[in-house]
Image (spheres, coloured by chain):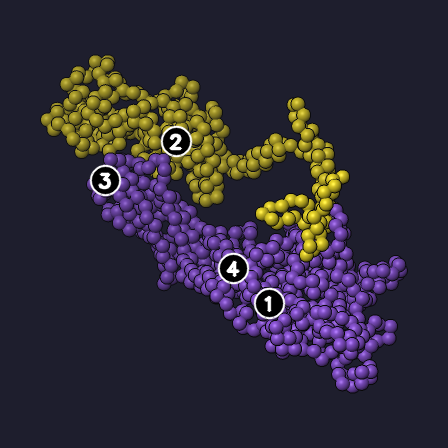
Amino acid sequence: MSGSTMKAQSPSVATPVPGQPVNPTGVRQYDVEAVNRGKKPKLYKGREPIYPRRVEGRFRTLKWWIMAVTLTIYYVTPWIRWDRGPYAPDQAVLVDLANRRFFFFVIEIWPQEFFYVAGLLIMAGIGLFLVTSAVGRAWCGYACPQTVWTDLFIWVERLVIGDRNARIKLDNSPWTARKARLKASVHGIWILIAIATGGAWIFYFADAPTLAAQFLRGEAAPTAYITVAVLTFTTYSLGGLMREQVCTYMCPWPRIQAAMMDEHSLTVTYNDWRGEPRSRHQKRLQREGTATGDCIDCNACVAVCPAGIDIRDGQQLQCITCALCIDACDDVMTKIGKPRGLISYTTLSDYAANTARAATEGLAVARAKQVLPGWREVMRPRVFLYFGLWSLIGIGMLVAVIARDRLDLSVAHDRNPRYVQLSDGSIRNGYTVKIMNMEPTPRTFDFGLVGLPGGLMWSPEIVDEPARRFAVEVPPDQVREFRVFVKAHPDDLEAIPDPFAFRTFEMGGGRDSSQTDAVFEAPQ
Amino acid sequence: MSAEKKHVDEPTGVETTGHVWDGIRELNNPLPRWWLWILYATIVWSVIYMVLYPAIPLLKQATPGLLGYSTREVLEKDLTRVAESRTELDSRIASMSLDEIADDPTLLDYAQRSGASSFKLVCVQCHGSGATGSQELGYPNLNDDAWLWGGTREQIFTTISHGVRNDTDPAAHTSIMPAFGAMGLLNRRQINDVTDYVLSLSGADHDAEAATAGKATYEAQCAVCHGATGEGNQDVGAPRLNDALWLYGGSHAAIVAQVTEPRLGVMPAWQDYFDDATRKKLALYVYSLGGGQ
């Protein structure tokens, strides 16, 4: 078959560009080595630069979308306004460390309610288990900030310098004004992105518009500048310079995830039963009657890999399953008229089944019947178990948040003296009362005694006249602490000490109420 | 060099270190170079730290460091700062009347807390940590509503400033109850009867016959200070006798003992020790214990 007839038969094959190496099959040949392939050991090893080539395909498109969504959430969230009335901040998501409040849209969390945040963290943990057991290391490949920012930084490189070859060429060229300009532009844009990343972070902790103005005028707190500086440094160095080193050496998560994988977990797999023996000279070998696999050894999978590995070496620690090699290989397979899926998301058990079928029934049958991942891989007991657990915690927290009281009453009996005898023969007990008004509106609460017949109380700060109940005004979103003296005649007591309760409820039609047990001490 | 052949891990082609756990061998992968840089950076940091801050322990003290940092100085600065922050509040307290302070919630809160702290320093020795006093020892309870020398803020302040029956302050509260028994002013029978009469004033258990007999003695000897109905007199520190509270005990025997040979409480004049502001804060604290009038 001559080159021209082949072109006519399969028009998708790329026209060879002059000066570019071409695989004997007709597609472009990449001259690339997997830089992180095992080599002879040295004591220390510098990072070898990786130049991922641009790729298009299903997974790349998905990654662009996830990047757009996650970055938008990160940068936009602090600027969303949320009206809570005149007594609370109008920022939808705000971690108010100074006042120890956490605002999340309709939810306001006080320090003693921090278990909700702990619950969210537990959900995030189980959520990672859930995702890992359903679709493998999807977190690493798509949503992890390290992956997203690295992707963004590579996009900047490509925009300024060009794709893989241009970048390699520039790095290998001697220093010229052009090289300096391009390098400065790339690093400059990286630093701008890094500053914006750190800058967005601080807006979660203060009123964003106010802080932005203060920050630009140089009037913000030193903590703000230090935080931005630290995050700028980490974003620039981790996203721009360290990249895959973070995933391979720093991050514990790949190790934990590796422990969570089993033979039914989806992972990016090179189907060697179909690809091997690989050859760049397929047509010649086929003419000679030698068996060849589907892999034409074009190295496209290696050229696009941001982790610098060769997926054909099998499952590797460094692989973050970003699936860009799938996109690259699918593209090549389409061009040479072979079915897609030489590199695919596959479980180990499916891979073993395919390999066995290829050995017994032959490559053609196995390729035709190649099992590609579907719902079957996702819907399995483990996934349901994690999902059940995850939902249970979520629903539990939701119910708790909806049902929780925005009022709390706590009472501490005086330890010393436990009681005081008064001149009219009655007994007085002292209590320190705290009423928490956890709503951002000033509220008035009725505060009264339950039980303790004949008992009367007063509070020096609120009312001097002894009574069974009185009104307490509590400022918005605050705790009001006050002293209460309760007096009763020993003849009226039912027991010593006499158990009774303080009760408080919102006046004016509010639903919140709270009751706390207390005791009245008296001499035996 | 060891003649032992290096073990090479087959799948990775990497030498192993020779460490084996449960058949698992440790790969001898090279460390990333940035890791090495971080190690160097920490070493440089430690050297800079040792030069700038106290670091190496010597016989008497550690090397001081170029910055001259010391935790003791930091503490002293903190204490000075706190003292300075109090100066302003204390000068306001000194210049205001007790009732004016009581109307300012912030100032009152500070005064009561500060007063509580001074109370723990010099008052608890007699009045107790809960300010409950002691009936056996005859120290008054400051929580209740009975006051020998008055329970308004000003009266409490005066008592604290000048004390009771001391010879250091001419303005100290002074009064005396005669030792009716010891000095032979009343005989045992009279004392017994007057005791029953005193018990009857507050409705306590008593011998009605003896009480009737003691009434005349009471009116002649006691009413001048304790009042016709036993209502007491704060001008002379004469306690109320018609209430449920007894400074030295309310039993028949305790009252007989007090009439026979009275105990007379004393208290130092605190103006010799404390400035105006501190005594005001003490007065406001004592007032807040529940019995203030």
Q: Which residue is mark 1?
A: A352
Between A67 and B186, the residue placed more toward the observer is: A67
Where does label 2 land, which residue?
A: B129
Label 2 to label 4, Cα distance in Å? Answer: 53 Å
Q: Is residue B16 left or right of residue A440?
A: right
Mark 2, secondary structure of its residue? loop
The chain carrying label 3 is: A
CA separation in Å, label 4 and label 1 = 29 Å
Read off the residue under disc 4: A126
Residue A164 falls in image quadrant:
bottom right
What color was chain B assigned in the picture? yellow
Question: Considering the numbered disc 1 on the image, is that residue within a helix, a strand or a loop?
Answer: helix
Q: Position of residue A223 (x, y in %)?
A: 64, 49
Real-space Cα separation, disc 4 to disc 3, in angstroms: 58 Å
Name the residue rendered at 54%, 60% in the picture.
A129
Q: Looking at the image, which residue is at 45% across and 41% down?
A: B108
The secondary structure type at the circle numbered 3 is helix
Colour chain A appears in: purple
Q: Residue furthest top?
A: B183
Q: Residue at x 29, y 39 (%)?
A: A521
Query: Could you tell whether A440 is left or right of A171 in the image?
Result: left
Q: Nearer the viewer, mark 3 or mark 1?
A: 1
Single out the mark in the foreground, 4 or 3. 4
Q: For mark 4, name the chain.
A: A
Q: Amino acid at mark 2?
A: Ser
Callout 4 amino acid: Ile
Q: Nearer the viewer, residue A378 or A165?
A: A378
Tell me the CA gap for discs 3 and 2.
25 Å
